[in-house]
Image (tube, rainbow, N blue to C red):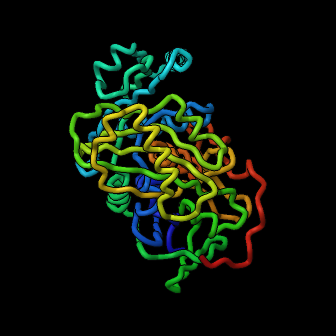
Amino acid sequence: MDCDILIIGAGIIGAALAAELAARRFNVLVLEAQTPGGGTSAAGMGHLVVLDDNPAELALSREGVSRWLACQSQLPEQVEFRRTGTLWLARNPVEMAEAERKQAFYQSIGLQSQLLTANQLYACEPHLAPGLAGALLRPDEAVIYPPAAVNWLLHCAKTAGAAVLREQQVTEIRPHRVSTQQGRVWQAERIVVAAGNASAHLLPGLPLKPRKGQLVITERYPGMVNHQLVALDYLQSAHGSAASSVAFNVQPRATGQLLIGSSRSFDDTSPEIDWPLMGRMLNAAFDYLPALRNLNAIRTWAGFRPSTPDKLPLLGPWPAMDSVWLATGHEGIGITTALASAALLADQLCDIPTALDGSPFRPDRFETAPVAEELLI
């Protein structure tokens, strides 16, 4: 065998898993088709936020944020870690009641949060549109720059003995071996597919569907926004099944720039910007933060989140092929949950009890199709 564990994909999930497994003294090899962190990870917003749409998502995202906070002192400056906190904005009394419900729930499970009145909200974010009812503050959440976080995780992995090879496009997976477009066959005790949307090309029958998103980043405007700002209806967009949707989400970056989101669409597979949808997204942002209209945008881009039918990732053994494991399908929470996902899967690979319940993420929760005899990307 060439290694104990071969990881396909060097995005945030593959990189985190490589670092975790190498630290546990596994002989790890990572194969990346292009540039590490250059796919979905590069296109994401980089928020570290606890989401509570369902118990499994809550547990994984909470553990993920906790692990990022725990390693804050180790992160190099390039990762641009900034503990901004998150303000969930309430437009009216109905949404404020939802904020109160969330705060009571968070208190019951030991998550720190604080309700802000309208006056308190405008004191800390004066550029918000007038008339908001208040907000829920989650103070211990943060933002990072995902490509730099990937590089740091891979550095940790290599320091612990892992090998990382780029421009190694996997074309075929078989039990205990993979073939690449470069003509090399690699053998491993176990193979972990962490290739994001490309995972579905490698393993026919994988329940993954790309979900397009678009973002805008501005020039530098230090101090205009102090917290990550998110509309309380964000989860309706993130977890809805509509063909396309938008929700307000703005992040202050360490550089002084503002990152503006977000959109989601299932039916658009083009990498080009959908300008009508971009217009909807920006108009939603202007409704909450009118000052954005006067700022200069320097870049727009689109990316594709790997989404599963139940919006939860695939973490565990792939039942259709011996020795193959999955770490993919994180949709919009891959950055947040990378470290927690890596620890969970590493525990499974070590056959030891997991700190989190891994059953909601098991790939065999979906019906699987037989693996084809051969598939070339």
Q: For this view, does 106 lie left or right of residue 145?
A: right
Please give the name of the residue rendered at 47% of the width and 31% of the height, measured from the top-left corner: 231
Horizontal and vertical percent for residue 192? 57, 61
Please give the name of the residue rendered at 49% of the width and 84% of the height, measured from the top-left corner: 182
- Compared with 286, 350 (above or below) is below
Please give the name of the residue rendered at 55% of the width and 45% of the height, measured from the top-left corner: 344
Horizontal and vertical percent for residue 102? 53, 20
- Compared with 253, 146 (above or below) is below
Dividing the picture into quadrants, the one containing residue 34 is: bottom left
Check the picture and name the quadrant holding the C terminus: bottom right
The reply to whether residue 26 is visible in this rendering is no
Please give the name of the residue rendered at 32% of the width and 55% of the height, measured from the top-left corner: 148
Check the picture and name the quadrant holding the N terminus: bottom right
* 129 vs 199, nearest the viewer: 129
* 372 vs 280, nearest the viewer: 280
Please, which residue is most extreme toward the bottom here? 183
Horizontal and vertical percent for residue 20? 44, 52
The reply to whether residue 185 is visible in this rendering is yes
Horizontal and vertical percent for residue 267? 63, 57
Dividing the picture into quadrants, the one containing residue 251 is: top left
- Compared with 99, 351 (above or below) is below
